[in-house]
Image: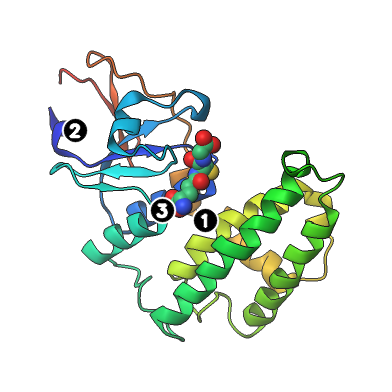
Amino acid sequence: METDRLPILYSFRRCPYAMRARLAIASSEQVCELREVVLRNKPQAMLKASPKGTVPVLQLPDGTVVDESLDIMLWALERHDPQRWLTPPTGTPAQMMALISHNDNDFKGHLDRYKYPQRFELISGIDNRDAGAQWLYALDDRLQSHPYLFGDMPCLADMAIAPFVRQYAHTDRDWFWGQNWPALIGWLDNFLSSALFAAIMHKYAPWNPDPALPRVRFPEGTVSAASA
Ligand SMILES: N[C@@H](CCC(=O)N[C@@H](CS)C(=O)NCC(=O)O)C(=O)O
């Protein structure tokens, strides 16, 4: 059947890392078989491909496994980059990577502690909310001179970072949308209302390895019977 030769993407709808991978796959017009994962019950096939057990995981038809979200973005965009996410209007790829690295290594730590203080034995996540906000104010400053992080067009950095800002914003929506960062709010609202975001947020039932069951093609989301 048609999906037999497609790359397989193990994904989880609400995971920001999986979102960024799906954004790049959709933008680059790659097609995958999407396997929605339940994190507390990860499929054996995924763990066999990538024993570290995080989503997203991309398994290529030749057996190659790409199991870091940023690497999946780069894999997709290096094949095809019609929206020029790898070549932003201003700044260099190295500057994009530095901003993404700050998101992944610093902001993400504050985000986790703000959202789940009990997991870190904290009484409250407010200090981390405020530490994360310092960086968001810096992003707001950048966004005051152009609508995206590196100019007039979205690029890899916007798409790699926005899912995490979304998660931070949704931790306390009233608080987030009440802050004085209008350019950041405009940027996030624009992302959340985009057709691309809608296209990557379809809901899929958890993957069931039974070969008789339909498989999901991403991004179209069309379901094809395994026997078709
Ligand atoms: N560095 C990895 C991080 C991925 C990650 O941590 N994903 C989370 C979900 S958002 C996960 O799979 N956690 C494992 C679990 O919850 O069991 C990447 O960029 O792909």
First in sequence: mark 3 vs mark 1: 3
Outermost residue, right side: 123
**Residue beneath label 3, please?**
69
Q: Nearer the viewer, residue 220 or 59?
A: 59
- Image position, residue 88 (x, y; %): 41, 79
Task: Say above or below: 191 vs 136.
Answer: above
Residue 167 visible, this orientation:
yes
| Disc 3 to disc 2, C-alpha distance | 22 Å
Q: Which image quarter: residue 223?
A: top left
Residues at marks 2 and 1 touching, judged by CB atoms closer than 8 Å: no
Which residue shows up at 81% across the image and 63% down it? 130
| Disc 2 to disc 1, C-alpha distance | 28 Å
Q: Amino acid at mark 3?
A: Ser
**Residue beneath label 1, please?**
194
Q: Secondary structure at mark 3?
A: helix
First in sequence: mark 3 vs mark 2: 2
Label 1 lies in ligand 1 vicinity (Cβ under 8 Å): no
Q: Amino acid at mark 2?
A: Thr
